[in-house]
Image: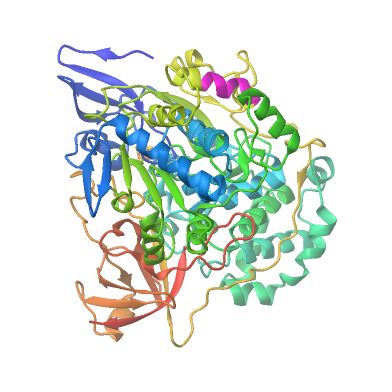
Amino acid sequence: MTLEKTKEEQYVPIVCPICGVGCNTELVISNGKPIKVVVKGRNPDLNGKFICIKGLIVADILNHKDRLKTPLYKESEDFKKISWEEAIKLAAERLYEIINLYGPNSIGILASGKILNEEAFLAQKFARTVIKTHNIDICARLCHSPSEIALRMQFGYGAVSACFDDFTEAEAIILIGANTRFTHPGVWNKLRKTKKILIVADIFEALSMADIKLRPNPGTDLVWINGLSKIIIDRDLYNHEFIEERAIGFEGFKKSLSIYNEDFVEKTTNISTDQLNSIANLITKKKTIFIWGMGLTQHANGTDAVLSIGNLALLTGNIGKRGTGIVPLRGQNNVQGASDMGCSPFILPGGYDTTDKGILTHFEGYWNTSLPKEPGLSATEMIHKILDGKIKALYIIGENPVLSEPQSAFVKWMFQNLELLIVQDIFLTETAKYAHIIFPAAALGEKCGTVTNAHRRIQYTEKAIDPHKFAKPDWQILQDLANSMDQKWDYKNTEEIWNEIRTIVPIFKGATYSRLKNSNGLFWPIHNENDEGSRRLYMDRFSFKDGRGRFYPVKPPFAYTKITSDFPYMLVTHRLYEQFNTGEMTLRSKITSKDVKNGFVALNESDTNLLHLTDGSFIRINSPYGSVVSPIKVIKGMKVPKGFVFAPIHFFKFINFNELTSTYPLDPLARMPSLKKIPVNIEKI
Ligand code: SF4
């Protein structure tokens, strides 16, 4: 990969640091300063000349006046500047004190879906070999942890099976709970061009483009999906040959479906048997891809919902062939990569289970140390364990749990109870305000390394400029801190870290830096340097000893979040095209914050009339757990069903809808809280 140079400007090839599509763009540097982002089409296989509005903000972020410039230390209520040496020494001493007093499992680390693969790898290595705990997690806990767990159980890898080319080769596409036009514009750009039969199950905007529109009651996807499987089996439309050759568990699965009778499915989901029959006719004859987003996963039964899709893919033979497959739309630019690198309490780098003794021995041998044997805690559990006195310190790298975790007021209260909070970030986030020590981190564009997009494509992203002021790349900060805690880490650059990853984890072995720099990315698994990589998974066998995919019986949801007379409206969270996650970046850019700066909710017109509300009226929204005040906004084209409140998640600083949510119940496997919807009532102010 080379830098193209004109007289005044350099075009530096970077990977977009926002969403999981991982578009290839160029950061334009003039006189040593980033001035804008362009897209020259160097990767026709991925985004070509496409870029969405969020991809344009990189220069704004790098230059922003709010960037953290030096390490900070909290004295009384104020932050004081300190040197790197002082900050690292202080953090190391405090971590040692806490380990000595309460043990290593009293410390938790939250890494990020935005840092490089190499940095995510070091974050989990720091947790496991320096602190000696599996208490390490990332934001995937609140988005696609159910997808990772379910796909690993059914097919072997916790990742997408298909690739972008399959969108073109498919004959039908089922999109569930994924408003891709807003959340993953690069994917939407591909989908809309394919002109395939589009079946959409959603309540948001994506529905308008569908050939078959399903409007399920939120949180009931697994019921209609299993109802569809039952219809396919009852009508003998299923793929006998595929199941015979490539799956196990069919008979048990078939028996488990008896509860999903037509009456139960229609009443629960609002989807008619006629609609399901039409879809059954279609997907049993046509090559079909299943794509889903957080509308499916952000529930306390998210893992079961994803298992239901996997069952349907096996039943219809729509996996392991061109033009078919399963596609969880991962959110952040490197959330797939950070998961692959083992930033999970349950998973080591390469997707290995932390309870597998043979695998622990493998890692212990490479790292020449013993690894913790006790299970780790998920992010949500770590925060709750502060109340129990079990967690005393958190080290948070590029995450913003004060805004993103459920029960925000509780999270803030808990953070005030920590003995030590270290935050490493590019801005003074709402979370960083509670920190005792802050490390200023370099942003993408100020460091080089690899990231992995939602399609398992490992890509190299170039460094364009030096880190802002005294900021450092996350991998260097982690190395400094580890070495202050008696380690002898000696990585000179990210390539050395990547080579360690390639040595330990066979599925990345063939993706050398030189190959990555001279390609448009490589798809894992990629076992050696002659291997072209795996654009598609499971073409011959699933990733188990017997090579067979697994059917899993799925029970109906154990917890429906229903409206009642006291809480008669259903608040559903969603995303806007211009904004991303907690808005720490997109709300700071003039490009993406021009039109909407503050939070709002949207209601159905008849509900606003009933409550005598108009555009700009303020309402108090009360859930069983908390309350917020928000203005009403009437948005042209946004069709809100009667009885619903649509709430965009990005404006947490101003209106934090997570104040309304609860951490109970949690998905028993993925530990996902029920974030997507919450029953509320409304008072006019
Ligand atoms: Fe960046 Fe995603 Fe937009 Fe592509 S689609 S430019 S990766 S935010």
Percent coordinates x, y for residue 38 in the rendering: 26, 28
In the image, is residue 215 above or below residue 179? Answer: below
In the image, is residue 362 above or below residue 407? Answer: above
Q: In the drawing, does residue 671 fall left or right of residue 616? A: right
Q: Residue furthest bottom?
A: 565
Instruction: State the residue at coordinates (64%, 16%).
Output: 528
In the image, is residue 256 above or below residue 620? Answer: above
In the image, is residue 117 above or below residue 677? Answer: above
Q: Which residues make up the magenta segment?
A: 498-506
Q: Is residue 410 magenta?
A: no
Instruction: State the residue at coordinates (75%, 59%).
Output: 553
- Can see residue 455? no
* Quadrant of residue 555 within the rendered picture: bottom right
Q: In the drawing, does residue 43 fall left or right of residue 600? A: right
Q: Main secondary structure of the magenta part?
A: helix
Q: Is residue 499 magenta?
A: yes
Percent coordinates x, y for residue 513 in the rendering: 48, 16
Percent coordinates x, y for residue 531 in the rendering: 63, 17
Q: In the drawing, does residue 590 fall left or right of residue 167? A: left
Percent coordinates x, y for residue 224 in the rendering: 62, 65
Of residues 369 and 273, the one drawn nearer to the viewer in this rendering = 369
Pick the quarter of the image with the C terminus. Answer: bottom left
Of residues 323 and 98, the one drawn nearer to the viewer in this rendering = 98
Pick the quarter of the image with the N terminus. Answer: top left
Instruction: State the residue at coordinates (44%, 59%).
Output: 207
